[in-house]
Amino acid sequence: MQSIVVLGYLEPFSAVVLSAVLLREGMSLLRLLGVGCILGGAMLAEMSGKKTRSSFSE
Protein backbone atom coordinates (compact mmCIF):
# COMPACT_ATOMS: atom_id res chain seq x y z
CA MET A 1 0.00 0.00 0.00
CA GLN A 2 2.79 2.46 0.84
CA SER A 3 4.51 1.89 -2.51
CA ILE A 4 1.32 2.98 -4.28
CA VAL A 5 1.30 6.19 -2.27
CA VAL A 6 4.93 6.91 -3.19
CA LEU A 7 4.15 6.36 -6.86
CA GLY A 8 1.23 8.75 -6.54
CA TYR A 9 3.64 11.45 -5.35
CA LEU A 10 5.83 10.91 -8.39
CA GLU A 11 2.99 11.24 -10.91
CA PRO A 12 3.16 15.05 -11.35
CA PHE A 13 6.94 14.93 -11.78
CA SER A 14 6.80 12.08 -14.27
CA ALA A 15 4.09 13.89 -16.26
CA VAL A 16 6.30 16.96 -16.65
CA VAL A 17 9.40 14.91 -17.53
CA LEU A 18 7.55 12.74 -20.05
CA SER A 19 5.96 15.77 -21.69
CA ALA A 20 9.41 17.32 -22.06
CA VAL A 21 10.96 14.12 -23.47
CA LEU A 22 8.17 12.69 -25.60
CA LEU A 23 6.30 15.82 -26.66
CA ARG A 24 9.37 18.10 -26.66
CA GLU A 25 7.62 20.69 -24.52
CA GLY A 26 9.69 23.24 -22.68
CA MET A 27 10.74 22.44 -19.11
CA SER A 28 10.44 25.79 -17.35
CA LEU A 29 11.31 26.72 -13.82
CA LEU A 30 7.65 27.54 -13.21
CA ARG A 31 6.59 23.98 -14.11
CA LEU A 32 9.19 22.50 -11.79
CA LEU A 33 8.07 24.86 -9.04
CA GLY A 34 4.47 23.70 -9.57
CA VAL A 35 5.51 20.06 -9.32
CA GLY A 36 7.39 20.87 -6.12
CA CYS A 37 4.31 22.56 -4.65
CA ILE A 38 2.11 19.57 -5.50
CA LEU A 39 4.59 17.07 -4.06
CA GLY A 40 5.23 19.20 -0.98
CA GLY A 41 1.54 19.64 -0.28
CA ALA A 42 0.85 15.93 -0.69
CA MET A 43 3.72 15.03 1.62
CA LEU A 44 2.62 17.54 4.25
CA ALA A 45 -0.93 16.20 4.10
CA GLU A 46 0.33 12.64 4.46
CA MET A 47 2.60 13.53 7.39
CA SER A 48 -0.12 15.43 9.25
CA GLY A 49 -2.57 12.57 8.64
CA LYS A 50 -0.19 10.03 10.15
CA LYS A 51 0.20 12.11 13.31
CA THR A 52 -3.56 12.35 13.69
CA ARG A 53 -4.09 8.62 13.14
CA SER A 54 -1.37 7.65 15.61
CA SER A 55 -2.88 9.87 18.32
CA PHE A 56 -6.19 8.00 18.03
CA SER A 57 -4.53 4.60 18.46
CA GLU A 58 -2.76 5.55 21.68
Image (cartoon, rainbow, N blue to C red):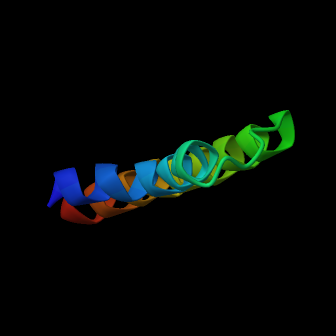
**Depth check: 19 or 43 in front?**
19
Left or right: 22 in relation to 23 = left
Residue at (83, 34) in percent of width and height? 29
Which quadrant of the structure image shows residue 53?
bottom left
Q: In this view, does 15 lie above or below 30?
A: below
Q: Residue at x 63, y 44 (%)?
A: 20
The image quadrant where one finds the N terminus is bottom left
Residue 2 drawn at (x, y percent): 19, 53
Viewer-closest of 50 and 32: 32
Residue at image position (31%, 53%) is 7
Residue 51: horizontal and vertical position, in percent?
39, 51
* Left or right: 31 in relation to 48: right
Q: How many marks?
A: 0
Q: Which residue lies furthest to the left in this view?
A: 1
Question: In this image, 9 relative to 1: left or right?
Answer: right
Residue found at the very far top of the displayed protein = 29
Q: Which of 37 and 14 is in front in this view?
A: 14
Please identify the quarter of the rendering in which residue 50 is found: bottom left
Tell me where residue 9 appears, x and y as whole percent.
43, 52
The C terminus, quarter of image: bottom left
Side (left or right) of 46 relative to 3: right
x then y, percent, for residue 45: 52, 57
Which residue corresponds to the image point at 67% horizontal and 47% vertical from the top-left?
Answer: 24
